[in-house]
Image (tube, rainbow, N blue to C red):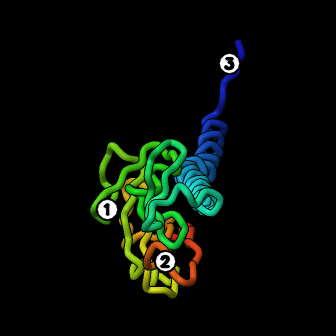
Amino acid sequence: MVNKGFTVIELVVVIVLLAILTVVALPKFINLQDDANQAVMESMKAAIKSADSLIALKIRLTPEALNTAKNRFTLDSGQNIRVRGMLADGRWNNTFVHLVDIKGIGQISSNNCTDDSLEWCVRQRGANWFLNRGYSTLGTGRGFVVFPLGKNVNQDRCYIYLLNQNDNAIPTTVQPSIVGIDLSEC
């Protein structure tokens, strides 16, 4: 009777090959979460930028929806949003929360996104925050930053940002909003 089995050497070679494949392939699978987060952030940036552009056009096309101070605009839904320089104001809670629909996002008052009930955090930022990071040369306006759970908005460059550079509702020269993304430390 002839036994047809594997030799110890054959088994060792197979185990070594499987180990090599695991070492090569595993990092790619582990990094899928980061890749997915970055893709979602790119989509959120596009949604915020589109909302900013669309509401600016809507304000120009329907100026009768502006209040007399020209700092509030009434949407078709009846919701009022803030306006600065005939553009959407750079506040999340008074403006963009009504313009974009992003699931799992919430405004926080700290720099750390540690609330496990959220996937994404929003933090209001003044013009100097953007100025200090080189995103703007103007020291006026306000904006917000969207960043993922587990990140710190002041320490990790992993966020989407919007800055309305205007300092009041009707400036003499309207500065465009800045919408960007920094994924360098994601």
Whether residue 174 is visible here, answered yes or no, is yes
**Depth-wise, is mark 3 or mark 1 nearer the camera?**
1
Where 96 sits versus 142, above or below?
above
Q: Which mark is residue 3?
A: 3
Type of the residue with mark 3: Asn
User: Which residue lies at the image location 47% right of the left edge and 55% below the top edge?
Assistant: 96
Q: What is the secondary structure assignment of the residue under circle 1?
A: loop
Label 1 to label 2, Cα distance in Å?
27 Å
Give the mark, 1 or 2, whose residue is nearer the N terminus. 1
Q: What is the secondary structure assignment of the residue under circle 3?
A: loop
**Depth-wise, is mark 1 or mark 2 nearer the camera?**
2
Q: What is the secondary structure assignment of the residue under circle 2?
A: loop
Residue behind mark 2? 166
Label 2 to label 3, Cα distance in Å?
84 Å
Label 3 to label 1, Cα distance in Å?
64 Å
Type of the residue with mark 1: Asn
Where residue 53 appears, as percent x and y from the top left, is 63, 62
